[in-house]
Every structure is written in structure tokens, then in C-alpha cells.
Image: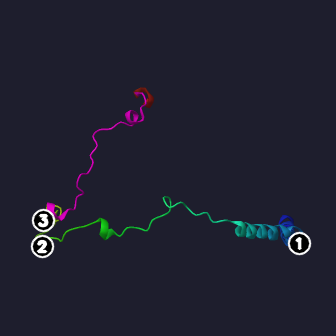
Amino acid sequence: KAHVKLEKASADAWPSKWGFLTEASKEMESEKLKKAVKVELPPHLAARPPTPAEKCIQVGPSPPVPQTTQGLIGWRSAHAHLQLEKPNTMQHGRRSLLRELGWPLEACC
């Protein structure tokens, strides 16, 4: 009980002894905000507005919906003229991180 009483007394006395520190820190923060200078980014680093999806992605109209559930499997991807796959996709064979970084093969073990 004595410890709790001492803590409560200290908490009550703190603003009268050390309250000026909170006011000083608030004043310093407001001064920093006033002095802060906004730096403009160069045009090549500035964020550009997003490109609408309709401009980049063009999907042709769908063929009629199949009548059977088995026909639903891949019914759009089976037609090449619908362009669901990106043309010229890059495919990589087996790769090695050690070879790409130019490290010796003994570095892995």
C-alpha cells in the first residue's frame, strides 16, 4: 500500500515539477513544422497518375457459354483469338543463383 501511495503522490506532483517539459516539446514540434520546407521532386521521380486498366488490357468478347459443365473447363482459354495469354512470355530454363552472381560452386556448402 505504501508503494502505491508513493506512486500516486509522485504522479500528482509531476505536472507541477516537470510540466514545463511537455509544453517545450510541443513548442519545438510546432516550430519544426513551420520551418519545414517542402522539397519538390524532379519530374522523373514524381509519381505519375495510374493508367486505366482498359488502356493496357484488351480482352475480346466471350464465345457462347457451353451447355455442359465439362465444356466450362477452359472454354475461354481454348480460343486463341480471345488473347487471354500474354504473347511472347519469357521462359527461363534451369537457373543457378550462384552462376548469376558469379560465385564459385563451393560457396553453397
Q: Position of residue 53 (x, y in %)?
A: 33, 68
Q: Nearer the viewer, mark 1 or mark 3?
A: 1
Q: Amino acid at mark 3?
A: Gln
Residue pictured at 29% horizontal, 38% vertical: 94
Kind of element beneath mark 3 = helix
Q: Amino acid at mark 1?
A: Ser
Kind of element beneath mark 2 = loop
Please tell me which residue lies in front, 29 or 3.
29
Return the residue at label 1: 16
Exactly how many numbered labels are in the figure?
A: 3
The magenta segment is: 80-104
Residue 45 lies, with reference to residue 9, above or below; the image says: above
Residue 97 lies, with reference to residue 80, above or below; the image says: above
Return the residue at label 2: 64
Asked if the magenta segment contains residue 39, the reply would be: no
Locate residue 35 relative to residue 5 in the image: left or right: left
Rounded to the nearest angstrom, the CA distance separating label 1 from label 3 is 80 Å
Rounded to the nearest angstrom, the CA distance separating label 2 from label 3 is 14 Å
Asked if the magenta segment contains residue 89, the reply would be: yes
Return the residue at label 3: 70
Locate residue 107 relative to residue 77 in the image: left or right: right
Q: Position of residue 36 (x, y in %)?
A: 68, 66
